[in-house]
Image: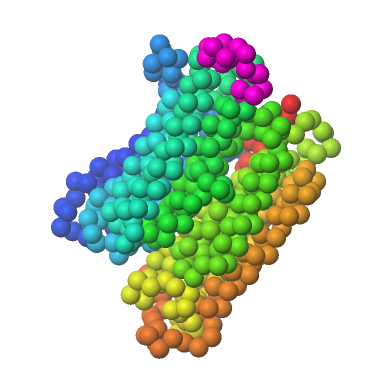
Amino acid sequence: MTFPALTALTLLPVAAAAVLLLLPQSSSKLPRVIAAALSLLILACTLLLWVRFDHTSGALQFQERHAWIPALHVEYRLAIDGLGLIMLLLTAIVVPIGIAASWRTKKRSSLYFALVFLLQACMFGTFTALNFFHWFIFWELSLIPAFFLIRLWGGKLAGPAATQFLVYTMVGSVTMLLSFLAIYLATGTFDFIELAGRGDSFLPGVAANLGWQHVNPQHLALVLFAGVFLGFAVKVPLIPFHTWLPAAYSEAPSGVTAILTGAMSKMGVYGFLRILLPIFAPQIHKLQTPLLWISIATIVLSAFAALAQKDLKRIFAYSSINHLGYCLLAAFALVRTSDAALLPEQYAAFSGILLQVLSHAITAATIFWFISLLENRSAGTRLLTDFGGLRRIAPVFAGLMGIALFSSLGLPGLNGFPGEFLIFKGTFPLVPWAASISVLGLLITAVFILGVIQKVFTGPLQPERAVFPDLTSGERVSFAPVIALMFVLGLYPQLVLGALNSTVISYVHQLRF
């Protein structure tokens, strides 16, 4: 019997949460030190998984498969390919960043960090489960720690923001659940891999089991697709299902926001790639044009919305929507009828998605970490108009945050560039009109990020910021690994791409019909 590596990895954060809850509640420093150490241990275990992963194979690996509820054909089935591996890695990287950004949290710190680890466990479970019943448990459970982290440690409007977050995501989950229940009644399986291999063959069975024989199977397929699509569209989120996000991100503690944008939003992208595209590829092909327009709106309108904001957290909340919009643009462009001449472009687009989700996770989480430090050093303010000239008195702070901002902008040489480049390299030949319009999002992103740099770090120094402290030696050491990673992935993206090539090839061929 092989070692259950994925189960162990999922249980590690649960054990970490249990350790934290057993600590004395009167202590505020000990929980954060232990949380940081445990998060780095979990990261090390995830890196070990990366090393043990067979990068020459596009097949599912580290498989665990056991009967769970035989009467319902529910299995405990875990496995990952390169897609699952990259999601595990970015989650393991983002959580230590979120803990570092929460370093000054003193209010019930043991409970706070325990909830962070429970959220991480739910994300690990989501990225490894291949049976809908099992997967859906983790998908829903992730809402609980996220809700309480926003509600109990957030800002003045944290209550409404947390409630809006919960209601929106629950509605999406309900529609997705109803669609999968209908599919299960027809197929007798919840297994994602088996359903992906069946194509449209399950549709007549759905109509028969629901007593809807008079309904056109293709129309029924679109209804089922819409239910699953809504669940993932809310989580990413895509416009117009995004209205919960700016409030949740701005009211949540910055460390929690780093985890929400860096890792939890990737659950939606993962759902599109692992579940929606393989199972509903014909429906996505049929609806490709409206889906591409939704992606374009997500990219362009969120960039304009970011440009109009004055609150730093709201700016980068909309920026997060913008960056993940590129992933969905490429994802919807992938699904098309067989054309061997376009295979290299499909490979490029999917490789770009994998790089983009990893790069955005690192960059966005780091930016919110910097925003946390700005808040701590300026009595909680984070408005653009409250800063200016910080480069003069905090040059190291300005320089390192500037690197993260330029990475978000997509500057060549930093990790934000290769993913966006590959996405556009792939999507231009596949859907030239959509890619051409989406380029406008890159332009607006450059405008609002350069505006942030100008208003926060240059110009006359605000009198109340005259004693703004630069980064301490400990903070500089903490930022060094993530800043170095931005350069490494920007200058040598093959470090990741080379490990995922087999997965890219296997996945793209799966979508060709």
Judging depth in this view, the residue of 364 and 181 nearest the camera is 181
Give the residues in magenta: 205-221
Q: In the image, what residue occupies the spot 49% across and 47% down? A: 265
Q: Residue at point 61% right, 57% down?
A: 301
Q: Quadrant of the N terminus?
A: top left
- State whether residue 302 is above or below residue 294: below
- Asked if one can make out residue 360 in the rendered structure from this viewpoint, the answer is no
What is the x, y in percent for residue 18?
Answer: 25, 42
- Residue found at x 82% / y 33%: 339
Q: Nearer the viewer, residue 179 or 66?
A: 179
Q: Quadrant of the C terminus?
A: top right
Q: Position of residue 278 (x, y in %)?
A: 62, 29
In this picture, is 49 found above or below 98?
Answer: above
Is residue 41 shown left or right of residue 194? Answer: left
In the picture shown, does residue 352 fall above or below 397? Answer: above
Q: Position of residue 467 (x, y in %)?
A: 37, 85
Q: Quadrant of residue 212?
A: top right
